[in-house]
Image (cartoon, grey):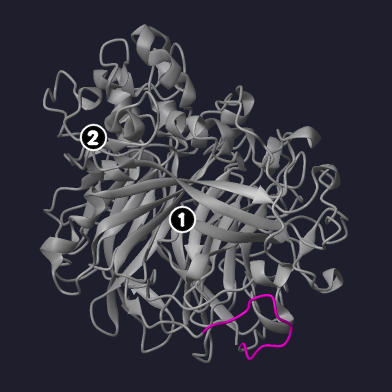
């Protein structure tokens, strides 16, 4: 059968927060950031002051060859794709043939006819040797540290031969209201509850195997499973790169500033050509207390990262005083990084790479420039924040692992500035296309720091890397609508940015790269770098997708017939299949239906034809996603099922994935075609 649980009516919920999220999601995921003042109060322009018309629309939309590409599944290096024009009508793209899933509020993982789905690994499943079976009412910190963590987000796969592999999965945050009966939080929470929540953060490596040569996979539960691993808030790590050892990273427990402990709120990520995970720390701000008690010189930087004053709801400080900034003001600087983890060595120390900057990281997508330098694309997931890129100084050398692992420690960190090519008066925030028929323009990557050299006046290199948001403010980067995932198309070389939403943007703040005020549904940006080189410092860009109800005049589907597309809201994570089709997962659907996974061709006659491939259960978010290299499996992380206002273990809003009588469990699922065909074909 195609679905994992029977149809079920959506329980009554309170009024959702901006973007369609529940109040519970806002509280536990990001510390109610949308309820607070916008952290970016810089005077950076919302619209480029120089109007450029140097590029025609077709020129803006061109895409071309790149020297090599790192793909998500297995981090394999791809051959240079053939030159292509994603804007042209009539291309030889392989068609997508499936009946779209209709918007729904079912408590199930819905997939198209002819497909099947299965949960592969759930919250609480044993990961390490000796781990006990999951027991909802008798969890302990020791058990959770050995079991699969809570809310799963980024998923990536490393092959161990044809029919076996390793999954890395991020565990972004915890929903204590759903994890513990009678949970009231804060000072009333037991120390064991706090420690369980801490152990449920981080990430997991689990071994999986293919089922009988199909697109189905399952968790390996027998044998040694020597690669399995848990990484938590308590895992010892190390800093590398220009900021390592700086005064800003030193604490009483680590006076050298090189030995951080643990990682927090890991959301999206990426992989490297040498087969490691890059996992992104995002909303780390919500775990600390007494942000108002730090030294005066630190307070502007604390404010820029929305660190709360007083106490937080989670109260990690009750069991580990390093989360109290009155006592340890630099501890907060030790979070918000890209962390590199070796999935093939469970004893390897994770590395926080300071050269990639510190912010609410989304994505760490790698590719190679034409000359072999490593390039990493990153987003900063908050309202009016920025898009970043890192370009290594050294070049990737196939097979030279020792050399390659140093590439992330020396290079140039850039931030993006976008300029539109339409008159400002044509951009009124309504989402109406300007007179040239496209939201498009040019852009540049502005250097912030390279090694020990700062390009930002008044800031040292270490200050730029630790206080990256403030550095980007000073160079007039473009304020975006929550930049989340950034991915590069393996066929065309074009780069795509998911901009989830921003209900705070006013009509006066609308610009061509963020063309809609009160943007509760989000949009997707496409950019093509000069000479199709990932290391280029200039690019052309366009907006092929403005999300929402197709019947709404403010939406845009790359010019495709809107009567034939699926409604889509709040794009979050992106992926590509082997044919270069763009897959979009959503978070916070503001159209009243469950979130889902969608696919959109970016070339030929079907460009802009958005179709929903699956929907996730009640109050869940679609994370991942990952399309296998052979195109026969789609992995999705079903995050926070049942995270609805008023839901408790005694009154759950979801029973997914185990059905009646069970509690909701965040899980990674796989979808495959019943006849072994490629996904979508």
Magenta stretch bounds: 83-93
Residue 22 shown in magenta: no
- Horizontally, residue 616 falls left or right of residue 469, namely right
Q: Nearer the viewer, residue 88 or 341?
A: 88
Residue 582 in picture, x, y percent from top left = 58, 70
N-term mark: 2 or 1 = 2
What is the distance, in whole Å, between disc 2 and disc 1 at their CAs?
Answer: 24 Å
Characterize the local packing of mark 2: few (<14), some (14-19) or many (20 or more) Cα atoms within 10 angstroms.
many
The location of residue 601, given as percent across then percent down, is 64, 76
Of 160 and 434, which appears nearest the observer? 434
- The answer to whether residue 92 is magenta is yes
Q: Main secondary structure of the magenta part?
A: loop
* Residue 537: assigned label: 1
Q: Does 178 sit above or below residue 80?
A: above
Secondary structure of the residue carrying tag 1 is loop
Residue at (27, 21) in percent of width and height: 330
| Above/below status of 110 relative to 106 | below
Tell me the crowding category of disc 1: few under 14, some 14 to 19, or many 20 or more residues within 10 angstroms, Cα based: some
- Image location (x, y in percent) of residue 401: 14, 66
Quick one: quadrant of the N terminus?
Answer: bottom right
Q: Residue at x 32, y 73 (%)?
A: 74
Establish if 393 lies above or below 602. above
| Residue 616 seen in this snapshot | no
- Which one is nearer the viewer's eye here, 45 or 565? 45
The residue to which callout 2 is attached is 243
Residue 158, can we see it? yes
Badge nearest the viewer, 2 or 1: 1
Where in the figure is residue 501, as x and y percent of width and height? 66, 45
Quadrant in the rendering for residue 397: bottom left
The reply, left or right, for residue 390 in relation to residue 30 is left
């Amino acid at each position: 059968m195609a679905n994992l649980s029977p149809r079920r009516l959506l329980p009554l919920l309170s009024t959702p927060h901006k973007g369609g999220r529940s109040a519970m999601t806002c509280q536990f995921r990001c510390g109610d950031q949308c309820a607070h003042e916008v952290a970016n109060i810089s005077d950076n322009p919302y619209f480029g002051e120089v109007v450029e018309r140097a590029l025609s629309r077709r020129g803006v939309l061109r895409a071309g060859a790149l020297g090599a590409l790192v793909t998500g599944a297995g981090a394999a290096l791809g051959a240079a794709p053939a030159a292509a024009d994603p804007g042209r009508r009539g291309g030889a793209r392989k068609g997508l043939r499936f009946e779209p899933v209709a918007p729904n509020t079912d408590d199930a993982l819905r997939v198209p006819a002819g497909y099947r789905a299965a949960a592969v690994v759930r919250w609480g499943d044993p990961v390490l040797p000796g781990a006990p079976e999951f027991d909802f009412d008798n969890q302990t910190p020791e058990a959770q540290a050995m079991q699969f963590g809570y809310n799963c987000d980024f998923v990536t796969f490393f092959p161990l031969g044809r029919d076996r592999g390793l999954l890395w999965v991020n565990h972004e945050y915890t929903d204590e209201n759903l994890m513990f009966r009678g949970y009231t939080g804060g000072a009333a929470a037991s120390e064991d509850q706090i420690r369980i929540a801490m152990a449920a953060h981080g990430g997991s490596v689990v071994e999986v195997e293919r089922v009988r040569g199909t697109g189905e996979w399952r968790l390996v539960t027998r044998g040694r499973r020597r690669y399995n691993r848990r990484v938590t808030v308590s895992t010892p790590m190390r800093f590398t790169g220009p900021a390592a050892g700086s005064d800003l990273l030193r604490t009483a427990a680590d006076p050298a500033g090189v030995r951080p402990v643990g990682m927090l709120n890991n959301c999206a990520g990426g992989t490297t050509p040498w087969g490691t995970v890059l996992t992104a720390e995002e909303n780390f701000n919500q775990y600390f207390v007494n942000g108002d008690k730090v030294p005066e010189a630190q307070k502007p930087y604390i404010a820029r990262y929305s660190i709360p004053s007083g106490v937080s709801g989670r109260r990690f400080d009750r069991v580990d005083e390093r989360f109290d900034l009155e006592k340890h003001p630099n501890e907060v600087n030790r979070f918000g990084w890209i962390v590199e983890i070796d999935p093939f060595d469970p004893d390897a120390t994770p590395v926080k790479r300071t050269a990639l900057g510190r912010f609410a990281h989304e994505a760490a997508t790698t590719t190679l420039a034409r000359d072999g330098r490593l390039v990493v694309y990153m987003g900063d997931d908050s309202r009016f924040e920025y898009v970043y890129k890192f370009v290594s100084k050294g070049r990737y050398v196939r097979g030279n692992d020792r050399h390659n692992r140093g590439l992330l420690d020396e290079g140039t960190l850039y931030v993006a500035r976008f300029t539109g090519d339409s008159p400002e008066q044509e951009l009124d925030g309504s989402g109406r296309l300007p007179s040239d028929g496209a939201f498009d323009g040019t852009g540049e990557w502005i250097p912030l720091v390279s090694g020990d050299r700062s390009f930002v006046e008044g800031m040292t290199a270490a200050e730029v890397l630790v206080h990256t948001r403030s550095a980007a403010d000073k160079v007039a980067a473009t304020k975006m609508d929550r930049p989340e995932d950034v991915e590069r198309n393996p066929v065309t070389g074009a780069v795509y940015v998911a901009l989830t939403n921003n209900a705070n943007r006013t009509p006066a703040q609308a610009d061509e790269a963020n063309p809609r005020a009160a943007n509760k549904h989000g949009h997707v940006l496409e950019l093509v770098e000069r000479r199709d080189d990932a290391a280029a410092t200039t690019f052309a860009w366009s907006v092929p997708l403005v999300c929402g109800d197709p019947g709404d005049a403010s939406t845009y589907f790359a010019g495709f017939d809107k009567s034939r597309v699926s409604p889509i809201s709040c794009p979050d994570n992106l992926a590509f299949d082997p044919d270069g089709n763009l897959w979009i997962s959503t978070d916070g659907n503001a159209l009243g239906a469950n979130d889902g996974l969608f696919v959109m061709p970016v070339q030929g006659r079907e460009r802009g034809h958005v179709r929903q491939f699956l929907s996730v259960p009640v109050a869940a978010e679609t994370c991942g996603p990952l399309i296998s290299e052979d195109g026969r499996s789609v992995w999705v992380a079903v995050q926070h099922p049942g995270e609805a206002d008023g839901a408790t273990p005694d009154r759950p809003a979801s029973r997914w994935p185990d059905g009646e009588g069970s509690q909701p469990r965040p899980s990674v699922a796989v979808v495959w075609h019943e006849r072994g065909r490629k996904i979508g074909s």
